[in-house]
Image (cartoon, rainbow, N blue to C red):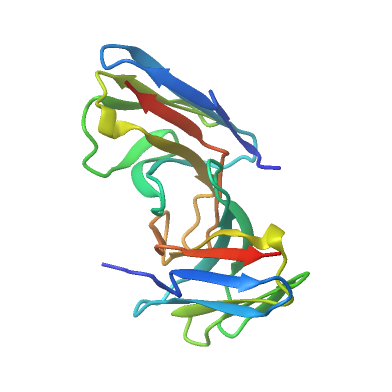
Amino acid sequence: DTEVTQTPKHLVMGMTNKKSLKCEQHMGHRAMYWYKQKAKKPPELMFVYSYEKLSINESVPSRFSPECPNSSLLNLHLHALQPEDSALYLCASSQVKISGNTIYFGEGSWLTVV
Amino acid sequence: TQLLEQSPQFLSIQEGENLTVYCNSSSVFSSLQWYRQEPGEGPVLLVTVVTGGEVKKLKRLTFQFGDARKDSSLHITAAQPGDTGLYLCAGVNYGQNFVFGPGTRLSVLP
């Protein structure tokens, strides 16, 4: 069983809605990630937080807004999304290590924008 | 830019057959992970390899990290339908810069 928990499992939202995806981990990891995955493709990195600070933003549109309230929680706020944003959104966590790191994924949140 | 390639991209075999999938790069990684992912689910970690030449076994799965830490292989013995899924390799050189391969989609037919 994954120790990274994501909610909701499924989300359907309109293009004018505001919604949030939530992620929680209790492994003591201080790096947390958001990935986007389209069908039959590998995960694409969106954001990385290290020690609760945004360290990587892979040129993600501002309609996606990440938030890291504390070391265990990571949110992704969604506003004015487009149908092409429909995808599996994966949260992940890892230790903050110089080398030999491993990343652990949650089960994902399926997002459908209508 | 670090890149990971995986081969084959697709593989369809009969139950009981053996198979090997490969993950290759021109870059050195400090660690490399293998994941299996089923449709609609997140990737599940199978193994992390760290030392060049390292071999790890997980039941019918054998993982090897290349001596130069640039490539890895996953060998499955006597494949079962439950092994069906997308196999992803991911490498990291330093910090949190994980690089993913495009995946190998395996189908094991009963």
Q: Quadrant of the N terminus of chain B?
A: bottom left
Q: Is residue B41 left or right of residue A67?
A: right
Residue A9: x %, y % from top left: 55, 27
Q: Residue at x 56, y 42 (%)?
A: B41
B23 relative to B67, above or below? above
Q: Residue at x 41, y 64 (%)?
A: B101
| Frontmost residue, B29 versus A109 | A109
B63 relative to B102, above or below? below
| Frontmost residue, A16 versus A77 | A16
Q: Is residue B62 left or right of residue A114?
A: right
Residue A27: x %, y % from top left: 64, 40
B39 relative to B49, above or below? above
Residue that lies at the very extreme toward the top in this rendered image: A17
Q: Residue at x 43, y 69 (%)?
A: B9
Residue A92: x %, y % from top left: 51, 42
Residue A28 found in image quarter? top right
Q: Is residue B49 left or right of residue B62?
A: left
Q: Quadrant of the C terminus of chain B?
A: bottom right
| Frontmost residue, A32 versus A18 | A18
Residue that lies at the very extreme toward the right in this rendered image: B59
Residue B48: x %, y % from top left: 60, 65
Q: Is residue B105 left or right of residue A40?
A: right
Q: Count the labels in the image.
A: 0
